[in-house]
Image (cartoon, rainbow, N blue to C red):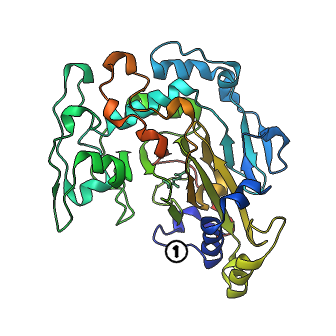
């Protein structure tokens, strides 16, 4: 058992965890679709042996928070007024909130993240590492922020390489290159630290939404963008100076999300062999010395990592093609603010049909310490 403060962001995952992740990455779709070891909240989560329902007292009326985010009534039903919350039995502290975000709010969140926040020069992206990214000035309809990169007027912007990287234009940046954007604390992926300089303010409406629904303060976020075929290798988020929960919200295509705590003994070579061969239940849940969970995340779901699960190894071995829900497939041509801007984004109609966007929110400072088991 170690203190969370001792965990090093540069540590590599134990081999047993990596072997387990690789198995999921290589698995045929038919195998994971048929697996009874995958937590899939489309099936009644109350019936799952892998979850237990928990009562979340802050949800006496979540609809107020949802309405505030959208700036008006969005016809919130009972499910969204009192969302259900489930804890994963194998990893206490790992909570799943199936479909916590109603459909209009998911579109509204995409609008804010990818039109407004992406066009804010204070927010770094992976593209900024290698290119000088230009911005179009604000327009009357953009409420003070720069013009969206999806706008026709932004298509002719010249993105200049800083080093020997090849030429890049806006459509290619949006379709292929853009993998992450940071909000609030601008995480430095190379140093695996947050810079000491004051961060740009965390977008207030997104902050209010996250803090209203989840027990944490939204101080930094990584917005991950995936296409089918993209993965996120197994890692631990241990750069924050506190042990408060981390919240992960999924939009668009579905994904397989793996979470594991490895007992010390699990890193031995014989256990690596067993990770590749062990057949517990349907043979894909990893060896016995991994406490693990495999979750199929759908658009509108949230996951909260707290307690010892806050520092669990986790990754995304697969984004599943053709699973973006129908109401979102046309985005940005049909966003929440469609009425206001007409078909301005028609050129990108269907962009979201081939994407998954993950909003991963962390608290950076101050709170109580926890001990981390099985590291
Ligand atoms: O995309 C996801 O669901 C997980 C992202 C993640 O683990 C991270 O940003 O650290």
For residue 184, say whether it is visible.
no
Q: Position of residue 113 (x, y in %)?
A: 39, 36
> What x and y, as percent, mark residue 162?
16, 61
- For image coordinates 67% across by 65% down, the residue present is 261
Q: Position of residue 167 (x, y in %)?
A: 19, 58
Report the number of discs. Answer: 1
Image vertical order of residue 108 relative to residue 325, above or below: above
Asked whether 52 or 319 is in front, the reply is 319
Against 121, residue 314 (above or below) is below
Query: Which residue is painted at 49% across and 19% down in the image?
Result: 68
Viewer-nearest residue: 340 or 234: 340
Q: Is residue 353 left or right of residue 75?
A: left
Q: Position of residue 41 (x, y in %)?
A: 72, 42
- Residue extending furthest toward the bottom: 269
Q: Which residue is mark 1?
A: 12
Q: Quadrant of residue 343?
A: top left
* Left or right: where 345 falls relative to 99: left
Q: Is the C-beta of the residue carrying label 1 under 8 Å from the nearest atom of ligand 1?
A: no
Question: Which residue is depicted at the point 65% across and 76% down?
Answer: 16
State the SS at label 1.
loop
> In this rendering, does residue 169 appear at all?
yes
Q: Residues within 10 Å of mark 1 (few under 14, many from 20)?
A: few
Which residue is painted at 33% across and 55% down in the image?
Answer: 177
Q: Is the N terminus in the top left, top right, bottom left or bottom right quadrant?
A: bottom right
Q: Nearer the viewer, residue 177 or 80?
A: 177
Nearer to us in this view, 111 or 304: 111
Quarter of the image with the C terminus in it: bottom right
């Amino acid at each position: 058992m170690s203190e969370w403060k001792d965990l090093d962001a540069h540590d590599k995952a134990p081999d047993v965890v990596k072997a387990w992740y690789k198995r999921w990455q290589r698995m045929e779709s038919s195998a994971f679709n048929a697996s009874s070891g995958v937590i899939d909240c489309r099936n009644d989560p109350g019936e799952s042996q892998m979850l237990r329902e928990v009562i979340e007292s802050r949800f006496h009326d979540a609809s107020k928070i949802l309405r505030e985010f959208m700036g008006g009534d969005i016809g919130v039903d009972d499910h969204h007024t009192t969302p259900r919350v489930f804890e994963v039995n194998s990893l206490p502290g790992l909570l799943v909130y199936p479909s916590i975000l109603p459909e209009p709010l998911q579109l509204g969140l995409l609008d804010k993240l990818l039109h407004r926040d992406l066009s804010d020069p204070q927010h770094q992206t992976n593209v900024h590492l290698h290119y000088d990214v230009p911005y179009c000035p604000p327009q009357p309809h953009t409420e003070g922020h720069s013009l969206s990169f999806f706008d026709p007027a932004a298509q002719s912007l010249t993105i200049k390489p800083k080093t020997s990287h090849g030429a890049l234009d806006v459509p290619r940046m949006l379709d292929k290159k853009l993998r992450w954007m940071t909000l609030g604390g601008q995480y430095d992926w190379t140093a695996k630290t947050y810079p000491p300089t004051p961060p740009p303010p965390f977008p207030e409406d997104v902050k209010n939404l996250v803090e209203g629904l989840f027990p944490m303060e939204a101080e930094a976020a990584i917005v991950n963008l995936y296409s089918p075929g993209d993965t996120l290798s197994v890692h631990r988020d241990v750069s924050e100076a506190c042990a408060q929960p981390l919240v992960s919200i999924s939009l668009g295509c579905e994904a397989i999300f793996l979470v594991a705590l490895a007992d010390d003994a699990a890193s031995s070579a014989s256990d690596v062999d067993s990770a590749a061969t062990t057949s517990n239940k349907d043979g894909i849940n990893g060896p016995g010395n991994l406490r693990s969970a495999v979750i199929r995340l759908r658009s509108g779901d949230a996951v909260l990592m707290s307690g010892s699960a806050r520092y669990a190894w986790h990754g995304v071995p697969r984004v599943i093609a053709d699973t973006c829900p129908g109401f979102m497939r046309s985005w940005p041509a049909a966003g929440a603010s469609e009425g206001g801007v007409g078909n301005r984004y028609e050129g990108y109609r269907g962009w979201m049909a081939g994407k998954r966007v993950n909003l991963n929110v962390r608290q950076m400072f101050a709170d109580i310490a926890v001990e981390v088991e099985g590291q």
